[in-house]
Amino acid sequence: MRWLIVLCGLGASAGAGCISSHCLRDADCAGSLVCREETGSCTEPECSSNDECNAGLVCEQRFCVGGCESQDDCGAGEQCVNRRCMSVGGPCDCPLAHEFCGTDINPNSPTAGTEVCVPDDFPDGVGLFFGSVYCGHCTADYAALQTRRAELAADGLAPRMVWVQLTTALATPEDVGAHLGPDVTDPVIHDSGALRIWEAFGTTWYHFVLVDADGCYITDHGPLDPTLVAGEEGATIVSEWRDAMDDECPPPAP
């Protein structure tokens, strides 16, 4: 379930009173309005199909956003992957994952309070989880992913993860520590209107994106469910994660 965040009476750690004007799902909006997740605002839908969007835009979650339907929509040196035009290059001549840097707001992380950059700070690859620390489904997904990650660790590997916090679900380090608990030591980076990480990856809630050791975009799994992560989809994630940590280049995208 996607939760509307209403921060009332949480004291100084939350930093404010109610944020009842923000939406996280359509049910939080009145009438025919729908929730635009990246802004947390209720608004009229813009599209129901790509045909209703201008050139260079695709219809996602009922809004026209920058993207592609096919290779023809991308420029030279780019490839259409997951409805996004990605630059092709690097040592593997692969679709390169979006690069970003942000401050780690997880107080239990070794890099707390410092800038963390993806993929530069993850020479063995990284898995990116998209959610909100206030969302019970998100934390359950993350716990399930950690269980699968332990399978790789048991083989002597050191798989890394980063939590990418929803832009409109404002969180302080205290909030992150309280909701994720002391055992989660992965970096948490708060998305923002400047970073636009969710938009760049074309993801939404409960998605898990793998970036390999060469900075190649590997795959996007989601929306996830803990039972799926524990089952066949989780086994696929483990296999792809293992390959992503390998020095070999991934096979060319179709």
Image (spheres, rainbow, N blue to C red):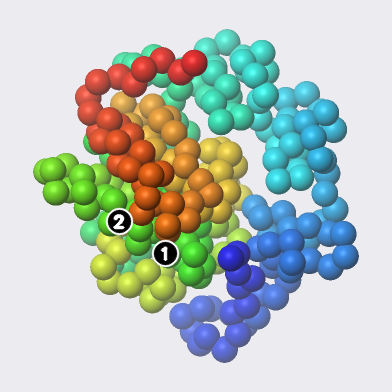
Direction from residue 21 to residue 185 in the image, left or right? left
Give the distance between the C-alpha atoms of the residues marked 2 and 1, in whole angstroms. Answer: 10 Å
Residue that badge 1 annotates:
140
Question: Within 10 Å of the Cα at label 2, are there few (<14), some (14-19), or many (20+) other Cα atoms?
Answer: some
Residue ranking furthest to the top = 76
Q: Position of residue 28 (x, y in %)?
A: 74, 68
Side (left or right) of 111 relative to 89: left
Q: Are marks 2 and 1 in contact (CB under 8 Å)?
A: no
Give the residue displayed 32% in from the left and 67% down from the top: 107
Q: Is residue 171 above or below residue 188?
A: below
Residue 182 image-quadrant placement? bottom left
Residue beneath the point at 82% across and 49% down: 45
Ranked by sequence position, the earlier of labels 2 and 1 is: 1
Q: Quadrant location of residue 156?
A: top left
- The residue to which callout 2 is attached is 146
| Residue at x 43%, y 52% (from the top left corner) | 228
